[in-house]
Structures are given as C-alpha cells and as structure tokens.
Amino acid sequence: DSGVTQTPKHLITATGQRVTLRCSPRSGDLSVYWYQQSLDQGLQFLIQYYNGEERAKGNILERFSAQQFPDLHSELNLSSLELGDSALYFCASSVGSPRDEQFFGPGTRLTVL
Amino acid sequence: AQSVSQHNHHVILSEAASLELGCNYSYGGTVNLFWYVQYPGQHLQLLLKYFSGDPLVKGIKGFEAEFIKSKFSFNLRKPSVQWSDTAEYFCAVTLNTGFQKLVFGTGTRLLVSP
C-alpha cells in the first residue's frame, strides 16, 4: 500500500459523458500528479499540482481539467468522453522536488463505451 | 523534449537466469533516473533511483542499475530472477528543474517461467 488512494477503481461510461476521478495523496505530500496509461501511448504525464496550484502541464486534452483542494486531495475531470479516453488513470504524490520518489495509487480504470 | 527508450518490450526468462533491461534517455542536462515496477494488478512501485555519486545503484529485491553518462544509459540488472519478478518494468527520468514530471519509457514486460 503506497498511501495514495484513488476512487473509483473502475468506471464504465458512455461517449459524450463526464466523469470525475478522485485522488488522496500520502499524508504530508504536497504534490499530486496525474498520469494516463494506455496501450498505444504508454504512461503519459497529464498534470501536476503543488499545494493547490497548477505546477506543470503535460499532454492533457482541453476536455480534461484538474484541481487540488485545500485538504490536498485532487480531482481529475474528464468531459465529452471519447472511446480513445479509455485508459488507466494513475495519481501519484510526492513531497515535491525532482529527486523525490513519486508514490502511485492503484489507478482508476476508465472504460468508455 | 526529453524521451526515454526501452528497447526490450517483452523478455522471457527461466528462473535463476540473469536479467538486464536496457534504458536510454535523451537529455543533455542533469537528470534523475528511476526504475519502477508494476506487478500484475498492482500499482507502480519504485525499485531504485539515481541522482548523483556512485553510478552503481542498488535497489530493493536484489535489483541494481548502472548509470553510464557517456551512453545516456541506466540499465537494470538482477543476477538471478525469480518467478515473482514477473512484472512490467518502467524506466523514467525527471529533470533538475522546477518541474517534477516523470517521463516514462514504454515499459518492458518480463515473464519468468518456473
């Protein structure tokens, strides 16, 4: 157990819908990262928040957005879902420097039908 | 933009065989290097990491990796694999800048037969 929790574990939805994925970081970690793992793209960085503020953006679509709340949990919102959005979405947390280990959650498997 | 290459996509070994998984990165500056492992149905876990100092790094479960700066490589090794090492292995880098995003390689699926 990494100490990072993600809900839900599985999500099945239809094209065009909107979903919210939730992540709670390890106690004491200020940084939260979101990654997408798919068969064709591999593991891709989406976005990072540090202590409530967006720190870095990766290959995140405009239909996707995220935020980090004052209690440091984070939500990833995916809207106007397409079949290609089906993937495993991981959240990770760390203290916040480039040398810190990132601790990964168990992931949310999203299936868009 | 930096990238990470893992040349072995699938590796099949028998128990007790030696393992070496290749990892090359493309970035001219200072990088931090990581190997993560994903066991079937589990989350990513850190095996080992390298920032500076001794280029031979020892990690958990008997794994080690060697940083060769001139070759931009960070290969993972284990002298004798076990069935329980069956997993997917990811090499990753971060840069020593304000951004801490991990850039992952494509992963290597290792199957160890008993």
Image (tube, rainbow, N blue to C red):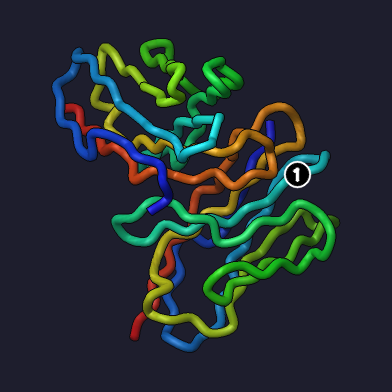
Q: Is residue A56 left or right of residue A46?
A: right
Total of numbered circles in the picture? 1
Q: Is residue A113 left or right of residue A73?
A: left
Image coords of residue A110 (percent x, y): 24, 33
Local SS, label 1: strand
> Which picture quadrant has residue A48?
top right
Residue at figure coordinates x 43%, y 17% from the top left:
A69
Q: Is the N terminus of chain B in the top left, top right, bottom left or bottom right quadrant?
A: top right
Figure check: B6 above or below B63: above
Up the image or down, B107 lies above or below A84; here it is below
User: Which image quadrant: the C terminus of chain B?
Assistant: bottom left
Give the answer, above or below, for where A5 lies relative to B59.
Answer: above
Where in the figure is residue B49, as x and y percent of width and height?
Answer: 66, 56
- Rendered residue at 84%/59% (across/down): B53
The image quadrant of residue A35 is: top left
Q: Nearer the viewer, residue A12 or A7?
A: A7
Judging by the rendered image, the residue that carries numbered circle 1 is B31
Q: Residue at x 50, y 48 (%)?
A: B106
Q: Residues within 10 Å of mark 1 (few under 14, many from 20)?
A: many
